[in-house]
Amino acid sequence: MKKILFMSVITAFMTVSCNQKSKEETAVSSEKTEKSAELYACPMHPEVTGTAGSECPECGMELTEKVAQTTAADNEATPVAVANEESSAITATGNVSKTAFPTDAIVSNYLNIKNALTKDDSNGAAVAAKNLLTTLNSSSTTSVDTKSKNKYNAFVDDAKAHVKHIGDNSGKMEHQREYFSLLSQDIFGLIKTFGTKQTVYQDYCPMYGEGKTGYWISETKDVINPYFGSEMLNCGRRIGAVK
């Protein structure tokens, strides 16, 4: 009798242990599945997504920005537009009129800063930056809807802060170039969202900013580097047209 009771206890214990192990394995498997399903985006090209650590095909940077997951209800409510992977152009998004904002004047002023830096002309970059600040301060958003206005103002506010550093630091080329890198991100976002009539390109230098911040917008067909100027004037490569 004791032997039968003992065997029953052992059997029950093994059953509980097996069930617990099965639950743990299921939990681990579920966790791995969730992690593998997480999407990450490129810091410079947020439309490019994939698994963590993958390389962005546009610029070669690692995908490090975690993408917020959407629910099935969200997906049903908001159709997602899929980009054409074969296109090398970086196109404007949204349905905002490309003439709603003075983006052409802003881009022209930005390009003047860029061209001065390619010539190692710190004073010229400062003058061009002050001209850009004047353009930014005089831009009007009265003719557009609130959502578009808020997007535009977000770009402009960041750009003002960065361009002021360039304008106020004539003679400090490295400081100007550091903030030109930040300004380039603002201009890229502005063009991508609201467009421009000018034909411009995004270029990249892997030697600047540890390969993370060496981006700029250019109107020239040749790659001319604003981060190193005469030291490495043609260092870099073209990523694509920005439309």
Image (cartoon, rainbow, N blue to C red):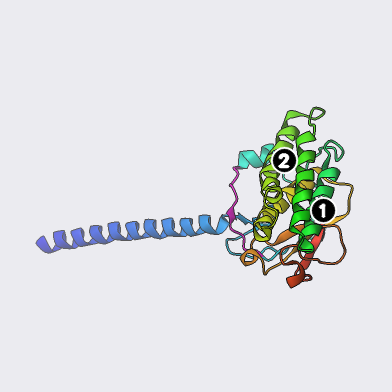
The disc at residue 49 is none
Residue shown at the point (77%, 68%) measured from the top left: 237
Instruction: Determine which quarter of the picture holds residue 217.
Output: bottom right
Residue 218 is situated, as x and y percent measured from the top left of the image, at: 82, 58
Q: Which residue is mark 1?
A: 112
**Number of numbered discs on residues:** 2
Q: Mark 1 vs mark 2: which is more N-terminal?
A: 1
Residue shown at the point (85%, 41%) measured from the top left: 98
Please name whichever residue, 232 or 210, is drawn nearer the observer in this view of the structure: 232
Q: Which image quadrant: the N terminus?
A: bottom left
- Residue 229 magenta: no
Residue 72 is situated, as x and y percent measured from the top left of the image, at: 61, 42
In this view of the protein, can residue 1 be seen by the observer?
no
Residue shown at the point (29%, 60%) measured from the top left: 17
Horizontal side of 151 relative to 53 (left or right) equals right
Please name whichever residue, 176 or 192, is drawn nearer the observer in this view of the structure: 176
Which residue type does callout 1 highlight? Asn
In the rendered structure, which segment of residues is drawn in magenta?
Answer: 61-71
Instruction: Determine which quarter of the picture holds residue 200.
Output: bottom right
Which residue type does callout 2 highlight? Val
Give the structural element (helix, strand or loop) at label 1. helix
Residue shown at the point (85%, 37%) measured from the top left: 97
Q: Which residue is mark 2?
A: 156
Please name whichever residue, 56 or 199, is drawn nearer the observer in this view of the structure: 199
